[in-house]
Image (cartoon, rainbow, N blue to C red):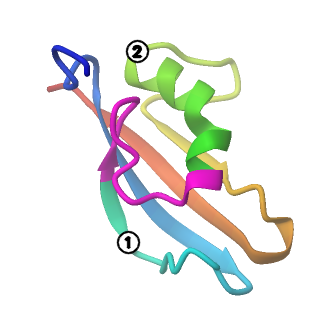
């Protein structure tokens, strides 16, 4: 177990769009605090897909195509596409 699971930025995920029917039951507007130590109820397939980006994002890194402290991610199910916005905040 991590000694300090609150390292890095606080990251809040918000479901912003669903095209189709989310088999994990996510709904538009749903919000949760996620981290590299806590998926907070996010679908396991989705969490697995975003984890490398989440790790970079939570610890202050960035990619050239990211816009500041907000990024948009999409689940791997392209037929029932769920989109989330990740926002990071200093603790």
Q: Position of residue 46 (x, y in %)?
A: 62, 53
Residue at image location 50% in from the left, 75% down from the top: 26
Q: Quadrant of the N terminus?
A: top left
Residue 38 visible in the current orientation: yes
Q: Secondary structure at mark 1?
A: loop
Residue at image location 50% in from the left, 53% down from the top: 85
Q: Quadrant of residue 75?
A: bottom right
* Residue 36 colored in magenta in the image: yes
For this rendering, which residue is in front, 6 or 64? 6
Residue at image location 17% in from the left, 14% down from the top: 3
For this rendering, which residue is in front, 57 or 68? 57
Q: Position of residue 10 (x, y in %)?
A: 26, 33
* Residue 90 colored in magenta in the image: no
Residue at image location 68% in from the left, 86% down from the top: 21
Disc 1: CA contacts within 10 A as few (<14), some (14-19) or many (>=20):
few
Q: To which residue does mark 1 refer?
A: 30
Q: To which residue does mark 2 refer?
A: 60
Nearer-N-terminus badge (2/1): 1
Mark 2 vs mark 1, CA separation in Å: 24 Å
Q: Position of residue 52 (x, y in %)?
A: 61, 25
For this rendering, which residue is in front, 9 or 68? 9
Q: How many marks?
A: 2
Location of residue 62 with respect to 45 vertically, above or below: above
The overriding secondary structure of the stretch rendered in magenta is loop
Q: Position of residue 88 (x, y in %)?
A: 34, 35
Q: Which residues are magenta?
A: 33-45
Q: Quadrant of the C terminus?
A: top left
């Amino acid at each position: 177990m991590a000694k300090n699971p609150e390292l890095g930025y606080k990251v809040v995920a918000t479901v912003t769009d669903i095209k189709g029917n989310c088999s994990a039951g996510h709904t538009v507007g749903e919000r949760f605090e996620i981290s590299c130590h806590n998926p907070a109820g996010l679908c396991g397939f989705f969490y697995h897909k975003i984890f490398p980006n989440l790790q970079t994002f939570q610890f202050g890194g960035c990619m050239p195509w990211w816009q500041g402290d907000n990024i948009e991610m999409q689940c791997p199910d392209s037929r029932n596409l769920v989109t989330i916005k990740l926002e990071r905040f200093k603790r």
